[in-house]
Image: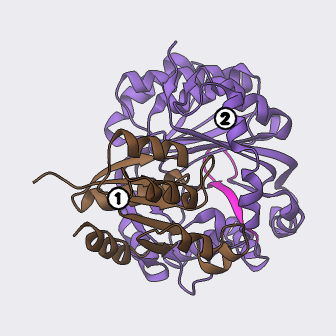
Chain colours: A purple, B brown
């Protein structure tokens, strides 16, 4: 098996993970993000899957470990008596790039997790990167085991990579919060109008099958512009991903071949938009601004992925134009 | 007429994607490098018409790379635009504006980058 050529890996340790569901609070994610904005909590990752026929929606967050108590206080009240809350205080975030929407990059990453028996707390995608949250005790071994399945021209070995990155985390920590515009600047918004939206829940024993399915999709020439995942109760991992609307049947066949016991839920006629370059990770409040803008326009996103510098959301195809219009009214779109 | 070749060096892959997309839509050919060393190798493998450099990068930061290229006769003529975080963030780090000025970069644009400002700067430096 040849390694897939990528250009970079990033590892951010000393993070924490917080994830919650609420059956009672219809604006759970909005309230959580509002609290985080008020408390000036920067996020490294936000993923959200709305309520659907696979159960209650879930919102997952990654932030600096020192902010997790503050974030917990923001999330706890909304979970109510029948919601759930998961807090992991010692988490590492491993990111690889660029994925170029290639299913085999995503599949290979999932395959490495399966091979190492690692249940990821969350996976998020940005236009260029895939980020995965794992226990901090596993982050070093995960980065090492990415060498082989992937190739990184700048580094032949994990040791070379590690040496290059030593000390970099401190620099990142020094930049506390860089941006304070009244209206948040975004470089541009791009959209994909005709997609299908898939959700599936797999156990650790099926993670390898999912990785293989994604690699099969590469052979069929499919592209995945959006992928998120998060751990759920009973050891399950819930994934949500988008494919072109025209690839619906081919994707369905791949899933049934590779994961015959899993029954993915599929919604047709959805759309995705991405806000490029709002420096998501450096700017508290930006997730709140996104969700509030959509909510004011009466739009409920099906899923959200915020990672690296970008924010992506999945909405019904009929809501795409209104979503972008709502964002244009609330963000300073530079192009 | 052949397209002008602009090399973007930044450790934020989304930033590279975004700026690259913006420049490609304006008719530029875009090269990408994800840290300072890769950036330097890319410059020496194929001389860009213009270089856009992030400041805070692993292995070799933008200040050092810019300074090295400006000291080298083979590369000192390449126009360099430095992109970095806004003033208050930079002053909280080991990357001071004074260091930036000492690199002899041709322009210095704070993030978040105003597209019009960046394009104007590129056009000015290429002409």
Q: Position of residue A117 (x, y in %)?
A: 77, 23
State if disc 1 and disc 2 touch (CB < 8 Å).
no
Q: Position of residue A82 (x, y in %)?
A: 84, 56
- Mark 2 neighbour density, 10 Å: few (under 14) some (14–19) many (20 or more): some
Q: Residue at x 33, y 60 (%)?
A: B77
Q: Foreground residue, A309 or A26? A: A309
Q: Foreground residue, A196 or A3? A: A3
Q: Residue at x 90, y 64 (%)?
A: A69
User: Total of numbered circles in the picture?
Assistant: 2
Q: Residue at x 61, y 55 (%)?
A: A50
- Observer-side mark, 2 or 1, equals 1
- Mark 1 neighbour density, 10 Å: few (under 14) some (14–19) many (20 or more): many
Q: Foreground residue, B92 or A80? A: B92
For the residues labelled 2 and 1, the Cα–Cα distance comes to 29 Å
Q: The N terminus of chain B is located in which quarter?
A: bottom left
Task: Answer above or below: position of B88 versus A165.
Answer: below
- Residue B53 visible in the current orientation: yes
Q: Which residue is mark 1?
A: B78
Helix or strand or loop: what does disc 2 sit on? helix
For disc 1, the chain is B
Q: Position of residue B35 (x, y in %)?
A: 54, 47
Q: Is residue A229 left or right of residue B32?
A: right
Q: Position of residue B63 (x, y in %)?
A: 56, 61
Q: Is residue A147 left or right of residue A265?
A: right
Q: The C terminus of chain B is located in which quarter?
A: bottom left
Q: Is residue B41 magenta?
A: no
Helix or strand or loop: what does disc 1 sit on? loop
Q: Which residues are magenta?
A: A41-57
Q: Foreground residue, A63 or B103? A: B103
Q: Which residue is mark 2?
A: A161
- Residue at the top extreme, as displayed: A1
């Amino acid at each position: 098996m040849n390694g897939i050529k990528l250009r970079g890996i990033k590892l951010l340790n000393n993070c924490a993970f917080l994830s919650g569901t609420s059956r009672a609070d219809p604006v759970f994610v909005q309230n959580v993000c509002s609290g985080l904005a008020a408390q000036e909590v920067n996020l490294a990752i936000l993923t959200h899957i709305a309520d659907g026929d696979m159960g209650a929606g879930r919102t997952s967050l990654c932030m600096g470990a020192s902010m997790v108590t503050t974030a917990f206080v923001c999330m706890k009240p909304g979970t109510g008596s029948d919601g759930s809350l998961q807090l992991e205080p010692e988490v590492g975030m491993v990111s690889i790039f660029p994925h170029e929407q290639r299913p085999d990059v995503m599949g290979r990453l999932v395959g490495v997790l399966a091979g190492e028996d690692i249940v990821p707390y969350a996976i998020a995608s940005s236009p260029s990167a895939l980020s995965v949250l794992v226990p901090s005790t596993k982050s070093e071994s995960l980065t090492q085991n990415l060498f082989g399945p992937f190739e990184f021209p700048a580094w032949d070995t994990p040791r070379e990579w590690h040496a290059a990155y030593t000390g970099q985390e401190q620099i990142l920590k020094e930049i506390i919060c860089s941006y304070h515009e009244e209206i948040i600047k975004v470089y541009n918004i791009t959209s994909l109008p005709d997609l299908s939206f898939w959700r599936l829940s797999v156990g650790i024993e099926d993670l390898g099958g999912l990785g293989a399915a994604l690699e099969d999709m590469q052979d069929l020439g499919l592209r995945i512009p959006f992928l998120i995942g998060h751990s759920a109760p009973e050891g399950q991992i819930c994934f949500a991903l988008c494919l072109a609307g025209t690839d619906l049947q081919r994707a369905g066949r791949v899933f049934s071949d590779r994961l015959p016991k899993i029954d993915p839920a599929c919604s047709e006629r959805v759309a995705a938009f991405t806000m490029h370059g709002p420096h998501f990770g450096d700017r508290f409040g930006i997730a709140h601004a996104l969700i509030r803008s959509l909510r004011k326009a009466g739009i409920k996103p099906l899923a959200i992925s915020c990672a690296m510098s970008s924010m992506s959301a999945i909405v019904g195809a009929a809501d795409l134009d209104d979503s972008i219009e709502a964002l244009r009214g609330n963000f300073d779109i530079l192009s | 007429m052949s397209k002008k070749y602009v090399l973007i060096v930044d450790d934020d892959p989304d930033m590279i994607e975004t700026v690259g997309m913006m420049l490609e839509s304006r008719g530029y050919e875009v090269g990408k490098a994800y840290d300072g060393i890769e950036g330097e190798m890319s410059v020496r493998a194929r001389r860009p018409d213009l270089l856009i450099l992030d400041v805070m990068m692993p292995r070799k930061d933008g200040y050092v790379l810019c300074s090295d290229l400006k000291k080298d006769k083979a590369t000192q003529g390449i126009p360099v635009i430095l992109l970095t975080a806004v003033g208050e963030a930079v002053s909280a780090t080991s990357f001071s504006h004074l260091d930036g000025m000492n690199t002899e970069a041709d322009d210095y644009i704070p993030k978040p980058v105003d597209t019009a400002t960046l394009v104007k700067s590129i056009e000015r430096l290429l002409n």
